Image (cartoon, grey):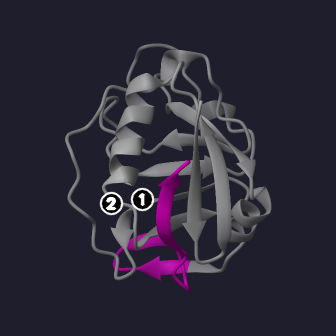
Amino acid sequence: MTTVMIKTSKGDITARLDDAKAPETVRNFLAYAKEGFYDGTIFHRVIEGFMIQGGGFTADMRQKNTKPPIKNEAANGLDNLAGTLAMARTSAVDSATSQFFINLDDNDFLDHKDNSPSGFGYAVFGSVCGGMDVVKAIGSVPTGNENGFQDVPLEAVVIENVEVE
């Protein structure tokens, strides 16, 4: 297990990444972290009681250029429980790049059910082991619409950096 510290404008979140069950996803996340990609990105999508999503947009809602998408490891046996980190993706199964989310609740509808596009799920690759109060605080910030996006925090919640410990 690799530990990371996600330093945000609301406080620090410590997470353990499961390199055994999600090796490609963890490698991908750590590569972005080590090159400073996450520095200055924001949690751009916050839905109270559901999840907080970040790692792809700057505070002015510009999407950053990413590496190619990775293989979806949602069938790794890890579930989308409260406090777990998972990769965000589009409707395409293998489309995750830099964006991740932290579940605020047990979201079993996001778990791997089968290999169909609608049942494949979202790959969990770690869990919060410190700073869940920070995650919950981010999860309850006021949100609105901005540049065609919904559920955007009205005041930017910045990921200052992600340190690999």
What residue is shown with label 1? 55
Q: Give the side of residue 92 with respect to residue 124, left or right.
A: left
Mark 2, residue position? 37
- Indicate whether residue 80 is drawn in magenta: no
Q: At 68% across and 38% down in the image, what residue appears? A: 107
The kind of residue tagged 2 is Phe
Residue type at tag 1: Gly
Q: Is residue 116 above or below residue 156?
A: above
What element does badge 2 sit on? Answer: loop
**Dot placed on the residue nearer the N-terminal end, 2 or 1:** 2
Nearer the observer: mark 2 or 1; the answer is 2
Q: Which residues are magenta?
A: 144-165
Check the image and report above or below for 128 versus 76. Answer: below
Q: CA distance from mark 2 to mark 1?
A: 8 Å
> For residue 147: magenta?
yes
Q: Nearer the viewer, residue 133 or 95?
A: 133
Q: Position of residue 127 (x, y in %)?
A: 66, 40
